[in-house]
Image: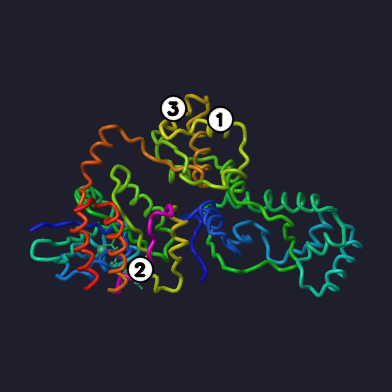
Amino acid sequence: MALVGNIQDFGLSDFLYLVDRGYKTGCLHLNRENEMAILFFEKGKLTYAALCHDEKLTDFLVQAEKLTPEQAGALTQAYERSGRNLPMTQVLLKEDLLPQEELQRTLQTHVEEEVVYSLFGWPEGAFRFEHGQKPEFESPILPTPLSIENLIMEGVRRIDEWGRIRDRIPSTDLVARFVDQPGEKAKGVKLAPEEWRVFARINGKDTMASIAKNTNLSEFDVCRIMYGFATAGLVDIIKKPTAAQLAQGAQDQPKLRRSLVSRIINRIQTM
Amino acid sequence: MQTVKMVISGAVNSGKTEFIKTISEIEVVSTERRATDDTKAIKKETTVAMDFGRIAIGNDLVLHLFGTPGQKRFDFMWEILSEGMLGLVILVDSTRPETFRETNRIIDFFISYRDTPYVVAANKQDRPNAWSPDELRLALRQPPRIKVIPCVATDRESVKSVLLELLYVILDRSSEG
Ligand SMILES: Nc1nc2c(ncn2[C@@H]2O[C@H](COP(=O)(O)OP(=O)(O)OP(=O)(O)O)[C@@H](O)[C@H]2O)c(=O)[nH]1
Ligand SMILES: [Mg+2]
């Protein structure tokens, strides 16, 4: 079943988080006015993205001057010989037409700079995620799929207005704390120096405003960076509870006897 | 007579009225009227004050279900409804991702200062484009310990199972005796 919505209401970074944590495989289709984009994921990682439907690896590499037209022809022949049952990227590596690192770097730069990051600038756009849909074998599929957290962090670096950020951080009196189990995820995230400065001050107590003061960053920058951490699933944004509120919360909570709860359960079971 | 209270909340149109209607044993005192403000575009009828349902547990005990009003201008009711509640069901219209952020704000409202037991009901699972409970958990960023339960609010067995899941959470936390 396809997941549908609009990135105006359910942001691209929220969707990428879902793909990542859900280890999703499939294709995200985005459309607005006369623009479109497709992003393919394999077990939560990005394998390929484009702003059109029929991009071919051979055309792309010739245009990028990584292959001569003759080499591209040789690649097409090798691909035909292989029975078209392997992604063309794999055939290219087998045939040793380009070193893997160079291929990765070329495709990754293209996918990140020209496709994914530009999508973070879309104010709206209909999306549709088709579970299980895979890219055409002839597409410029990345030899090593990209992890999503870094895409999210990079996308968030390009945010330059409060709108999106306020959804998650409506006030600078809020506090960030580390999520209970960020697990493996936290390891692969690459932070810029000023992001580290903010990261180091996350303690579940200091507000955005006080972190801004202590780091000499603007409140906007601190909130933007925290928004990135929160979107990548590293931190939770919480209110700063006062001692009085904590005490009152404890009183509010009626502690019911087990026997009473069991009676309610029995009643509902037999309804 | 002892009464205990559960709150059924969720964004506009998530199915709160339907949920309570399906399980309550008395005619629900819900006040439906033609929507006037922000909800007008979505539906003809909306809950104006609140929904109320009742399930008698025995001669000395009754369970009250309170549904929060959908419209923003009745937000002040929430504070009152949430006082002393035993637990909370958060309904989500699984077919409308545009309501997920609002759903998160509702969860935050109820649980930020009190550690109220709650479950998320992924409602309208009978609709073809419903997001699955697993997808909703990620979309709403609910930790693994919070149950996200498939739900069809018009189906009695389904509503029962949501209430029971919530009661098991409450049971785990209740005191001996
Ligand atoms: N298919 C389907 N429709 C449902 C389900 N639950 C509710 N609906 C429909 O969704 C619409 C909204 O349901 P309500 O119960 O009025 O929602 P509400 O949360 O009380 O709405 P407000 O009071 O306006 O906030 C109605 O048309 C219901 O019949 C469900 O599980 N499946
Ligand atoms: Mg209603």
Asked whether A36 or B107 is in front, the reply is B107
Label 2 marks a residue whose chain is B
Residue A7 at what x, y percent from top left? 51, 56
Residue at mark 1: chain? A
Q: CA distance from mark 1 to mark 2?
A: 44 Å
Report, in whole angstroms, how far the alpha carbon at label 3 lies from the one at label 2: 43 Å
Q: Is residue A129 left or right of residue B8?
A: right
- Residue A206, image quadrant: top left
Mark 1 residue element? helix
Q: Position of residue A199 (x, y in %)?
A: 53, 34
Residue designated by label 1: A197
Q: Which residue is mark 3?
A: A210
The residue located at (24%, 57%) in the rendering is B7
> Mark on residue B151?
2
Residue at the (62%, 35%) spot, across then down: A192
Q: Which residues are magenta?
A: B142-155
